[in-house]
Every structure is written in C-alpha cells, then in structure tokens.
Image: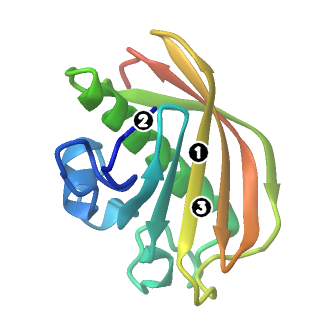
Amino acid sequence: MSLGTTPFNRLPGGTCLDRGWIESHIPHRGRMCLLDEVLSWDTARIRCRATSHRLADNPLRAHGRLGAACGVEYAAQAMAVHGAIMAHMAGAQPRAGLLTSVRNLVLLVSRLDDLESDLIALAARLAGDESSTLYEFTVSSGGHDLLTGRASIVFGVTQA
C-alpha cells in the first residue's frame, strides 16, 4: 500500500492514529483501551505502542502482577485497530469481531508489568474473508520478543 508522503502512523489526510482515535474505533474504552498509538500500518500489518502495562491500575492485573499471557489482549487490540483502519480506508464501518482461538502461543517471559520499555504489539494478517481473519502476532519490549502466536477472529458472532 502506497501512502505517498503520509507518515505510516497517520491516515491519508493526516489524521493521527493516537489513543483518542483508537478508543473511538474499537470496543475498548477507558482503562481497558490498552494501546497508546499506532506506530505503522499497511494492508497486511500493524505496529502499536503501549505503556499501560506499567500502570498499577491496569485492568488485567491480578494478584499484584500483569502476567505475560495478558499480552494476547494487547495483540488482539492491535488487530482490532488494524480492522478499523482497513474499514475506514474502504469507507465502511468496522465490524465487531470475536477472538475465537489463540494457537502456537509462546510466552518468553512470565510477566509484563516489570518491563521499563514500552510494549510493541505487531499483528500481521495471514488470511481472511468476510467471516473470519487469521493474524500472527508478536509483543515485544526493548527489542526483545515477549510472546508470539496466532489468533483467529470471527465476525458476525453475537455474545450471549
């Protein structure tokens, strides 16, 4: 995808993909919106930055810590943002999706809250159609991978 002179962290026309934009385009609001900004994106992938792993009131914390498996939610939110950007580019409304499976999950650390560097969530779309999408993801910090895996998103599913 050629964006011309538009930076990769903005939409054509200059709209900045910051926390405000993210929060208004994915279902997560307030403290549950974990991402701070989009660093780069194209039609196949997205990189987002987050600092919320260091917050004492992070809604995913349990027993005084933020376990590494919570990184899947950071990646899932990056996938949702990617879908919202793609819908925006197509002139459509983003579709609600449901994370239905996580496969090949590898946790390379035990926790995220003790990391001083920002988290970087990378999601790459591998395949998809109108009913589902498959992403590969990595969450890293300070140049080191923290967790990797694949996630399936299904569209048009209503939660009971």
Give the class, few, some or many, for how many residues have Cα within 10 Å of label 2's Cα (few <14, many ≥20): few
Question: Which quarter of the image is occupied by the C terminus?
Answer: top left
Residue designated by label 1? 123
Q: Is residue 50 above or below residue 130?
A: below
The residue sitting at 42% across, 84% down in the picture is: 55
Between 110 and 89, the one lying in front of the other is 89
Q: Is residue 120 left or right of residue 145?
A: left
Mark 2, mark 1: which one is toward the viewer? Answer: 2
User: Which secondary structure lies at badge 2?
Assistant: loop
Eyeballing the image, is 39 above or below 41? below
Residue depicted at x 74% and y 60%: 147
Q: Nearer the viewer, residue 145 or 40?
A: 40
Circle 1: residue type: Ala
Pointer 2 with pointer 3, Cβ within 8 A:
no
- CA gap between label 2 and label 3 equals 33 Å
Q: Amino acid at mark 2?
A: Ser
- Residue 145, image x and y in percent? 75, 66
Q: Secondary structure at mark 3?
A: helix
Q: Amino acid at mark 3?
A: Cys
Under circle 1, the secondary element is strand
The residue carrying mark 3 is: 70
Q: Nearer the viewer, residue 5 or 98?
A: 5
> Tag 3 or tag 2, which sits nearer the N-term?
2
Question: Do the residues bearing badges 2 and 1 touch, measured as CB atoms within 8 Å?
Answer: no
In this picture, residue 109 sits left or right of residue 36: right
Q: Within the image, what quadrant is residue 112 found in? A: bottom right
Q: Which residue is mark 2?
A: 2
